[in-house]
Image (tube, rainbow, N blue to C red):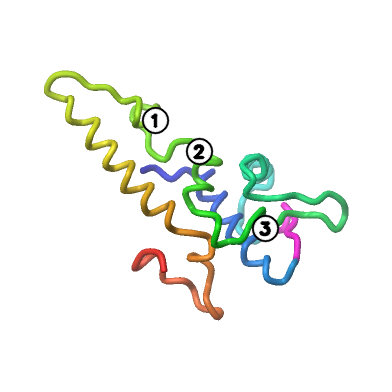
Amino acid sequence: MYVSARSDYALRAMLTVAAHRGDGELVKAAALAERQQIPLSFLQGILVDLRRADLLVSHRGTEGGYALARRADAISVGDILRAVGGSLTTVRGLPVELAAYHGAASGLRDVWLAVHGAIALVVDRTSLADLLPVDGRPSNAGASGPR
């Protein structure tokens, strides 16, 4: 699995918004860009995709900004990756489900489908809430899997 800058930025932005959910604060795009050191012009396109996927809501005006569209435990890493990048796994730029092989290579499709399934299992069962710091301490989800 290749994690693009776009996917990484989307996850970092969503985690930043999720971290501010508890205080009821809307997060402005410029603040997200600054906090996560993401180019603002690049981030704005990502935020549009996240909004279209119903993962974020935006509020206009001077007091506006972004908030999660649902609770952090109801948004998976997979939801975010699919919103900004499409299929989780590709073969030659196509979704793995479309891979076709013949002859001696015909078993490859099963391998790619298994890889896709394993990735989907991890990213779909890991929510934003799983990745947020607990009591001011960083989450250890990366070391041992989702909590």
Label 2 crowd (10 A; few <14 / some 14-19 / many >=20): some
Dividing the picture into quarters, in which one does residue 140 lie?
A: bottom left
Q: Earlier in the sequence, mark 3 or mark 1?
A: 3
Q: Nearer the viewer, mark 3 or mark 2?
A: 2
Q: Position of residue 10 (x, y in %)?
A: 57, 49
Magenta region: which residues? 25-32
Using the image, tell me which numbered label, if any, was put on residue 34.
Answer: 3
Q: Quick one: SS at disc 2?
A: helix
Label 1 crowd (10 A; few <14 / some 14-19 / many >=20): some
Indicate yes or no whether the magenta region holds residue 93.
Answer: no
Q: Residue at x 67, y 50 (%)?
A: 56
Q: Is residue 81 above or below residue 134?
A: above
Label 3 crowd (10 A; few <14 / some 14-19 / many >=20): few
Question: In this view, which residue lies farthest toward the bottom?
Answer: 135
**Mark 2 and mark 1: Cα distance apart in space:** 11 Å
Q: Is residue 138 left or right of residue 56?
A: left
Q: Which residue is mark 1?
A: 95
Kind of residue at disc 3: Glu
Q: Quadrant of the C terminus?
A: bottom left
Q: Which residue is mark 2?
A: 85
Q: Earlier in the sequence, mark 2 or mark 1?
A: 2
